[in-house]
Image (tube, helix red, strand yellow):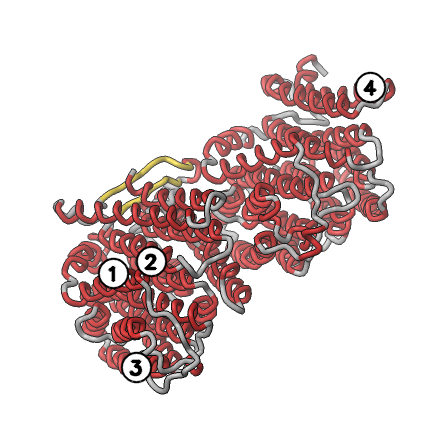
Amino acid sequence: MTSGGFVALAPMVAVAATVVVLMIAIAIGRHPRVTIGLTLAGLAVAFALLFAAGGSPDRAAPLLVVDEYALFYTGLILAATAAIALLSIRYLDERPEPHDEYYLLLLLAALGSIVLVSAAHFVSFFLGLELLSVSLYGLIAYPRTREQAVEAGVKYLVLAAASAAFLLFGMALVYAELGTMTFAGLAASAPDRVVLAGVGLIVVGFGFKLALVPFHLWTPDVYEGAPAPVAAFLATVSKGAMLALLLRFFAGIDLRAHHALFLVFALLSIASMVGGNLLALLQLNVKRLLAYSSIAHLGYLLVAFLASGAMAATAVAFYLVAYFVTMIGAFGVVTVLSSGEHEAETLDDYRGLLGRRPWLATVFSATLLSLAGIPLTAGFVGKFYLTVAAGGAALWWLLVVMMVTSGIGLFYYLRVIVAMCLQPAGEAAAGAAAPRLPLAAGLTLAALTVLLVWFGVYPAPLIALIRSAVTGMA
Amino acid sequence: MILAWLILVPAIAGVLAWAAERWSRAWPRWVALAGTIVDLVLAVRLWIAAWSAAAPPPGHWLVELNLPWIDALGIRFHLGLDGLSLLLVLLTAFLGIMAVACSWTEIQDRIGLFHLHLMWVLAGIIGVFLSLDLFLFYFFWEMMLVPMYFLIGMWGHERRIYAAVKFFIFTQISGLLMLVAIVALSVVHGRATGVYTFDYVQLLGTPLSPTTGWWLMLGFFGAFAVKLPVVPVHTWLPDAHTEAPTAGSVVLASLLLKTGAYGLLRFVLPLFRDAAASFAPVAIGLGVVGVLYGSVLAFGQTDLKRLVAYTSVSHMGFVLIGVFAGTALALQGAILQILCHGLSTGALFILVGALQERTHTRDINELGGLWPIVPRMGGMTMFFALGAMGLPGLGNFVAEFLVLIGTYQVSPTAAALASIGLIISTLYALWMIQAAFQGRSRETIRIRDLGAREMAMTAALVVALVWLGVYPQPVIDAAVPVVATLTTGPQGAAR
């Protein structure tokens, strides 16, 4: 590797170095404010280094490809991680556990995601995936005195390990047949049955991580059990990185030429849209509702993925940005409303929120409307973009399913908003001595809301940025 | 910029009204009223300007605003005003004032929030009437739904959540299918010309194969048919109108339904000329069914609000017939019917709402003999009921008459059947008055008559309706260029 390679890898190195520095700092003494400060500083440095890495001609091949595409998603992951870290501060203040390891794990999970979006080789793919998964076990079960959290952690551990086994076996089949482990090598090959079987197993691995129906069974339980900010991480960074990888993985493969693969993804997409939206209708728990909503959203994203091409990649990237902003905002509100002992997750916790906490209720309404794809929000433009991409590829039936299911889906988002506007039930009002809004979380939520409206009203600059980044996929 | 202000003024007034609640419970009402009045003044100024200026050549707009927005997708912030949109914007601003005024005493909780939603519905509706970019149109189309949902769901009557959800699911799914059709149209246009755009003017005259044209036309027609409503997909309407608060019913019946009619005139006919022509017999048939079915069901109702709601189904059937009959007279009649129905039905909902506010019932069987107690209310209700049944001298008569004459040129059968609807409308209108205001008086009922605010509102509506009935020429003049473009064929439409 040349010195240019190090420049390209600089953002990754910065995150990894922050982890090491953090460990040393923890060894010297535990100071929550120092830990969070170091974490944010490390993320900021990594973000700044993205601009340097962009100029580097060396792409750090063959394991990784640090191209514009990877850098864009790296930036997104870094920003999302920083937002989640900021939202976590007060949440952790109220818990008996020490703070420090939480940020350590968060940084490691972010590093794993960054490796994923830059991966061009099975080895880096698996490395990133495991780094992400292992950190997430710890994060999900972080409130170790809460039974639900530990249960969710174990559930995630078992299922993620099983899916990793599928993935590995698939990779092994492909390698045994083709003798290559690079994505490009796979794309260039003439696939036979064994390779196709291998790719099929890899798709199962993707399915688990993206929580597509029918691989979604863990999602609601884990989201419900995990601490709210970790659920935000699961729904956004973990899924987003995986989807970015999926696009790169299949970039060289013409899905339309492989009817079986196309059909598999189309069915996964339809199942996720229908299943996610219908199951969400039944939920009275806001965290589970958001979990099912995220399943449905991944279904929409797969429609654009199937459209393939530059337009589709742009649409996916835009939708992901909108989805990140929205989901982190939504889980952010849940986080802020949760106290140490009590997660604000039932619909009753939100009754009359508009009267008690008008600003939080407004932010939450904005995020829910964005998830529902209502105008003036980023979600609306995102959904429109997906429709245009899918329409350009003439995927009419998938589009019709998407429209009908998202029409149904509106119902459960609106139900939460209506609940917030209602008068609170007696005991909920009494038990709602919710904690004061901390400054860091408040500013983060305000920033997210501004972005949400900005991307919904004037998305042109973001689209221009994404276009230049996505066309740079090497 | 004045077009943008037409949309922005109610939107800003809504936010201010919401914020104003913290100072006083009366402030939101005044702020909202000021917003709607400013909007009406702006619209009237546009009308005067349009009147005094020479008519623009066909295919041009009286006022136009065209700004870059999302270049990557070929989307521009393109607003335009012609005679048709001008009339509808005037109607919206005028009835917006009525909607604020009729909630003055009815709405007592979350006043600021109520006016926020009300103003945003109005902003969305005006946006729909002005948009000349299909993305922008869809943007406003969706934007007016959400606040409407909350108006019904939060301030409505007994079964409000059911009604709100039904309304929302119907309109939302049909709207989303229209979105698919919008995107498909843009894609077809892009493939044919290499220009990917959502601009209405550019999309006019897109070459479409008959099958594609048919499907896309259906995508648009579906969304507008739900709004209008056309009979098989009308079932949301009686529920939504009945459960909504008075202002909600007024906005729904007088304005929201008109977006469906407007969509047919602005998009379905010009964009899919051939498909619409071959679809016309079906649409006219559906219209006739709507006229008869709506009026028969109206006659069978005991709930006053439901009764008025079904008369809307019947009256909007005339609009559907007129639009698809396609002759100049029928189109003029349809446009006039849109306006007159907006005024008369809005007034009826205001009166029924006022009655319910006083008696706490809408059940016709529990009422009766109210005339001696509330003579002013009785008289006003009588007037608008006669208007709804098409009494000569009032706007509705002119409108329905024009539609029938225009339709007779195309299909005498349809015209004959639809005129039966007029007879049934006499039945329900007179029966409503008889059951609620005539007959045996109940001594237990002691209620106030219409106050000054309510008299002012209804009097304004009376003046407007009589004016449209006696001297509709200014309105017809304003609509002439639009009708000419619709009837002269694609050359006229695509400049």
Task: Please check whether the numbered discs 2 and 1 fall on a single chain.
Answer: yes
Q: Nearer the viewer, mark 4 or mark 3?
A: 3
Per the model, the C-alpha gap separating discs 2 and 3 is 25 Å
Residue found 18% across the figure and 67% down from its top: B469
Residue bearing the label numbered 3: B430
Where does residue A443 sit, x and y in percent of width and height?
A: 61, 31
Q: In this rendering, would B22 be left or right of A82? A: left
Secondary structure, mark 2, is helix
Residue found 34% across the figure and 77% down from its top: B373
Where does residue A89 sit, x and y in percent of width and height?
A: 73, 32
Where does residue B429 sit, x and y in percent of width and height?
A: 31, 79
Q: Within 10 Å of the Cα at label 3, are there few (<14), some (14-19), or many (20+) other Cα atoms?
A: some
Task: Please check whether the numbered discs 4 and 3 fall on a single chain.
Answer: no
Tag of residue A25: 4
Query: Relative to A428, does residue B67 appear above or below in the rendering?
Result: above
Q: Chain of mark 2?
A: B
Per the model, the C-alpha gap separating discs 4 and 1 is 76 Å
Q: In this rendering, would B494 be left or right of B10? A: left
Tag of residue B460: 1
Q: In this rendering, would A113 be left or right of A149? A: left
Q: Within 10 Å of the Cα at label 2, are there few (<14), some (14-19), or many (20+) other Cα atoms?
A: many
Q: Nearer the viewer, mark 4 or mark 1?
A: 1
Query: Relative to B321, does residue A265 appear above or below in the rendering?
Result: above
Foreground of the two, B374 or B203: B374
Q: Label 1 is placed on what type of residue?
A: Ala
- The answer to whether marks 4 and 2 mark residues whose Cβ atoms lie closer than 8 Å is no
Secondary structure, mark 4, is helix
Q: Quadrant of residue A183?
A: top right
Residue A266 visible, this angle? no
